[in-house]
Image (cartoon, rainbow, N blue to C red):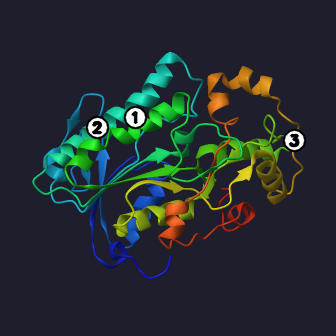
Amino acid sequence: MGSPPAAARARWRIAISGARGLIGGPLCRRLAKLGHQVLRLVRGEPQPREDEINWNPQTGVVDAEHLEGLDAVIHLAGENIGDGRWSFQKKQAIRDSRVRGTRLLAEALAALDRPPRVLISASATGYYGSRGDEELTEAAENGSGFLPVVCCDWEAAADPARAAGIRVVHPRFGVVLTGEGGALARMLPLFRMGLGGILGPGSQYLPWISIDDTVSGLLYLLANPELIGPVNLCAPHPVMNAEFTQTLAAVLGKRPGPHVPVWALKLFLGEMAQETVLASQRALPEKLLNAGFNFKYYYLEDALRTGRRLG
């Protein structure tokens, strides 16, 4: 990652929502290893210790007193978009968990006497919608569809913090690859049985990133004040679904399974299919690269083969 960033040299107090999630767990462990104090934003009554802060986006409750004097806040919490079909209620939960939670936190931080220097508030490459083979840097416009609208509202919900002079960064996450959870963990059983096949046309681009680079990228956002606004957090070489399928199967010593046609995906996943597995986002991390961030894994095969990323 080049020279050690400021956040790696000084002990910071950092509050994190979604601290037990796919990204939050490894991030908390890395920060603790570096000597930072991690405070977890939790729903319900905090445990009798100093590393938990109460908040509840549904009821609009946040313990603002314990947010005073923080160096940074990393907001990762949100309803899992890939957990179940998109009913009206599910879509409402996806949107509300992101927009309400972000607005609650941003307003609370804006009202502090000693606000943090930076708020890193999650977003996703879903912001761009499905754009074929168009190269999507952070300058690309918002797409159309449910997820692009959610992402746009999600990012806008942090405006109170921006207006208060807090540096706000929106990491637009690609698909985070780890065998411990998320999309890859759901794929692995099928691929190990030789059933993981190309989805739909196979030409749709997948913006992926290793869990290692995800955590390192977030640390880089913390430490580099020139990074503001949206930042694509995805590897420099997105791949089409066909290449992803062939690479993962080869890494596991298998052949790709049968092709899954569009109609079957829509039948099984409903509306979610069109905006997730069939969507094409050729997102590129232009801001991170221009800022000097060095990815550990530029290429998909290296990310899948190295270490125990497949669980």
The residue that mark 1 highlights is 153
Residue at the extreme bottom of the image, as rendered: 3
Res. 103 mark: 2
Looking at the picture, which amino acid does disc 1 mark?
Asp
Q: Nearer the viewer, mark 1 or mark 3?
A: 1
Counting from the top left corner in percent of width and height, residue 235 is at: 61, 60
- Number of labels in the image equals 3
Q: Along the line of sight, which residue is nearer the eye, 73 or 223?
A: 223
Q: Along the line of sight, which residue is nearer the eye, 296 or 128?
A: 128
Image quarter of the C terminus: bottom right
State which tag comes first along the sequence, 3 or 2.
2
For label 2, the crowd category at 10 Å Cα-Cα, with few meaning under 14, some 14 to 19 and many 20 or more, is: many
Mark 1 to mark 2 CA distance (whole Å): 10 Å
Note whether residue 46 is visible: no
Kindly indicate the quadrant of the structure image that contains residue 272.
top right
Res. 257 mark: 3
Residue 252 vs 43, above or below: the answer is below
For label 1, the crowd category at 10 Å Cα-Cα, with few meaning under 14, some 14 to 19 and many 20 or more, is: many
Q: Residue visible at 13% across and 50% down?
A: 112
In the figure, is residue 232 to the left or right of 8? right
For label 3, the crowd category at 10 Å Cα-Cα, with few meaning under 14, some 14 to 19 and many 20 or more, is: some
State which tag comes first along the sequence, 1 or 3.
1
Mark 3 to mark 2 CA distance (whole Å): 44 Å
Counting from the top left corner in percent of width and height, residue 74 is at: 35, 53
Counting from the top left corner in percent of width and height, residue 62 is at: 21, 40
Res. 102 mark: none
Q: What element carries label 2?
A: helix
